[in-house]
Amino acid sequence: MSKGDAADAVTDAGTALQEMLKSLGCRGNQLGDLIRSAKSKGLLGAHDTPLFETFEKAMHWVAADRSEKGESHHLSDATLDDAWLIVHVVGAFIVRLASDEGRGSPSSA
């Protein structure tokens, strides 16, 4: 983003989320499939359902935004505002997933 390549940042954010979900054992070839897999694997605790529903909608937006504005599709131009938003949303979700405490694991009880 520092070089003004917003489309690349949008694509890279989606790819980072895909790789994180795969590293946690989620299955699927597309971000939507990986998100559903993450939900079925219980990567967040039951008390996190409202949060997860919000993140799930946001991550579907990530997938749609990457398809619409990412560098590989160029259906429309991504702005730096688009890039900053998606990088922060995805980054926050990745931080949450990376924490054992955020995944409802037995060690967090």
Image: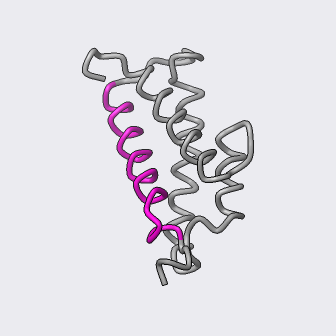
Quarter of the image for residue 49 reads bottom right
- The colouring scheme, among rainbow, by chain, secondary structure or one colour, is one colour
30 or 83, which lies in front?
30
Residue at 55 percent across and 68 percent down: it is: 44
**Does 33 sit above or below residue 46?**
above
Q: In the image, is 94 to the left or to the right of 68? A: left
x, y percent for residue 32 = 68, 45
Could you tell me what secondary structure mostly forms the magenta stretch?
Answer: helix
Residue at 40 percent across and 54 percent down: it is: 95
Residue placed farthest to the bottom in the image? 109
Q: Which residues are magenta?
A: 80-103
Residue at 44 percent across and 20 percent down: it is: 8
**Does 47 sit above or below residue 79?**
below
x, y percent for residue 55 = 51, 57
Based on the picture, tell me whether residue 68 belongs to the magenta stretch. Answer: no
x, y percent for residue 48 = 51, 74
Residue placed farthest to the left in the image? 2
Residue placed farthest to the front in the image? 107
Q: In the image, is 52 to the left or to the right of 25? A: left
Q: In the image, is 54 to the left or to the right of 39? A: left
The N terminus sits in image quarter: top left
x, y percent for residue 7 = 44, 20
**Does 7 sit above or below residue 97?**
above
Q: How many marks?
A: 0
67 or 37, which lies in front?
37
Based on the picture, tell me whether residue 86 belongs to the magenta stretch. Answer: yes
